[in-house]
């Protein structure tokens, strides 16, 4: 018999705070959705809904293209 660990339901941070849009200039909040190497975390890992995950990805890519964020971490 296998026992399942209790996992808390993940929730979308942007839906909970009722943020109207994700700002690409807000680097501090965007960094929490990246790994140590600079990859974007999947929505199932950070709990974002599909809509906000797409907006988050777009914001990170915009910040990278205008050199606010690095593409990779060394």
Image (spheres, helix red, strand yellow):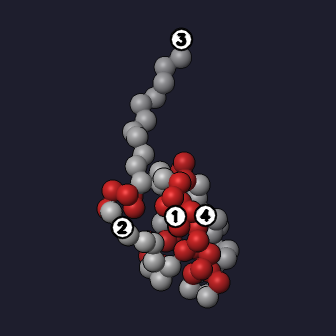
Distance from the alpha carbon under mark 2 to that under mark 1: 16 Å
Q: Which badge, 3 or 4, is on the more N-terminal residue? A: 3
Front position among marks 3 and 4: 4
Q: Nearer the viewer, residue 52 or 13?
A: 52
Where residue 44 appears, as percent x and y from the top left, is 54, 48
Query: Which residue position holds label 4?
Result: 40
Where residue 4 appears, as percent x and y from the top left, is 48, 24
What secondary structure is found at the residue carrying circle 2?
loop
Distance from the alpha carbon under mark 1 to that under mark 3: 36 Å
Distance from the alpha carbon under mark 1 to that under mark 4: 6 Å
Query: Which residue position holds label 2?
Result: 19
Residue shown at 58%/67% (left/top)?
Answer: 57
What secondary structure is found at the residue carrying circle 3?
loop
Q: Is residue 74 above or below residue 40?
A: below
Residue shown at 40%/40% (left/top)?
Answer: 9
Query: Which residue position holds label 1?
Result: 33
């Amino acid at each position: 018999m296998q026992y399942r660990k209790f996992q808390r339901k993940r929730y979308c941070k942007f839906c909970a705070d009722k943020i109207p849009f994700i700002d690409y200039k807000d680097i501090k909040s965007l960094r929490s959705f990246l790994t140590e190497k600079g990859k974007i975390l999947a929505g199932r890992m950070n709990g974002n809904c599909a809509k906000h995950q797409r907006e988050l990805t777009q914001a990170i890519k915009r910040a990278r293209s205008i050199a606010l964020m690095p593409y990779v971490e060394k």
